Amino acid sequence: MRLSIKGKEFICWVVVIVVLFCRVFKNNDNNIVNHEIVEASNYNLKIDYPDVKNKTVAKIMKEYIDTKKDEFVNTVKTLENEEFKYEFQATYSLSSSGKTESVHIIIYSFIGGNHYIREDKSYYYNVNTGEFLDLTYFLKDASSLEELSLLSYYYVNNYFDNNNIEKNEELIKAGTKSNLENYSHFIFKDNGLEILFVPYQIAPWSEGEIKITIPYSDLEDILKKEYLKESDTPKEIIANKRDLNPFKDKKLIALTFDDGPSNMTNKLLDNLDKYNARVTFFILGSRLNQYKDTLIRSYEMGNTIGSHTFSHLNLYKLSDYDIIKEVKNTNDLLKEITGHETSFLRPPYGNINKEIKELTNMSTILWDVDTEDWKYKNAEKVANNIIGHAHDGAIILLHDLYETSVDGALLAMERLTKEGYAFVTIEEMAELKNTTFDKTTSYFSLTN
Ligand code: ZN
């Protein structure tokens, strides 16, 4: 917003009146002055001191501003200048959330050069005790900052895309990295956590400050419960959990189906109960809207849903932002449809490395038996490939796109259940084998 000279004049008068008003009514209120305006020969000064209930907190913030003010005055008092006046301005905004309050102070000073120097400082504190807090106080656990940093990276890129602003990848990376300093300014809004990035933190100075809002639905694993405001949570589909005791003495196989859902998925689902079997689907986000009902059905039955990304691109060829987008868009859609995200990722073509693992923050599930079902499109051959390589802990790769793959899987189940095998999901297998997934590892099979 640009103000006309008249508008500025008007605001000045309002400020002067407010100052006088405050002086009159604050006479007895210890010595905290809320506003200060000085017009010296070579500089102007305008300060709004934070007016907060807790006087100890107010005093500390006042001291901060006064230190900055003294620095400014000392710098400019000896400078002679006929053409313009030096300036110092301090403003603040306050927001509260439950027992905590935050004050964001912005100081602008002009000491020559091309533009104002801007300094931001936020204080977070307990309203009653005056205890100062930082972001870690609001976070769920030790890994939350790392997760928040990934999300911020995503939403910042999103912001640039939506506003058609050219990106400086280096600045974005550095400015969203998981250190507390990068997350010094945040407030709890109705629709999510608003994070403010100061000028030059993630974009050139000319872009000014940039604010992103991360919806609370994305922050359930990051913020402490009491700081998650109600957001529109989708209806939650409850997955049927099986009693795993009958499988304890069995040899276990995890059949995994990639690239679906499709019209063939239902044929598989129709027949799983015959073999007391459940399987794992690595779905493509791009197919979910079309096969929503199939997804809900397979999730409800207790099959495991993993992500095969949104559009099946080779992750090696994508930028960091696009990699995150491929994973996040899929999880957002899963959440929208079933109420649950997945923590399992099967990267397209099995292409994964350390950097991608860090970016996606999921458990990577690969396979140790490849049926090559897409190549043979022959049920007997698919069945024989499964039977021939069957072993305890096997993870077997199939695709629920072809009827021959589904038929082949069913044939193999028929045969192998008689030989002491049980067909379980990746999650069930992990539980039965006491495996805790480590996100830095790739799993080809699960052994005890
Ligand atoms: Zn695939």
Image (cartoon, rainbow, N blue to C red):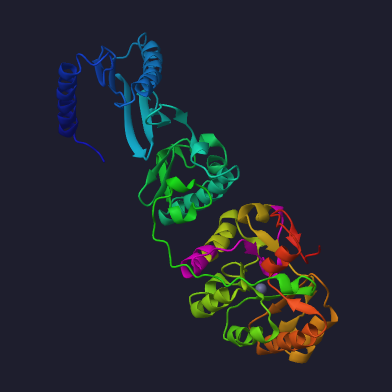
Residue at 25 percent of width and 21 percent of height: 35
Residue 87 image-quadrant placement? top left
Between 357 and 97, the residue placed more toward the observer is 97
Residue at 44 percent of width and 46 percent of height: 226
Residue 171 image-quadrant placement? top right
Indicate left or right for 406 with 433 as reference: left
What is the span of residues highlighted in magenta in the rendered image?
A: 331-354
**Image quadrant, ligand 1:** bottom right
Furthest-right residue in view?
A: 388
Q: Is residue 111 visible?
A: no
Residue 178 forms part of the magenta stretch: no
Please provide percent x and percent y for residue 115. Answer: 38, 29
Indicate left or right for 249 with 27 as reference: right
Q: Which quarter shows the N terminus? A: top left
Q: Is residue 168 visible?
A: yes
Between 130 and 263, the residue placed more toward the observer is 130
Q: Which quarter shows the C terminus? A: bottom right
Residue at 59 percent of width and 59 percent of height: 323
Please provide percent x and percent y for residue 325. Answer: 54, 60
Please provide percent x and percent y for residue 173. Answer: 57, 44
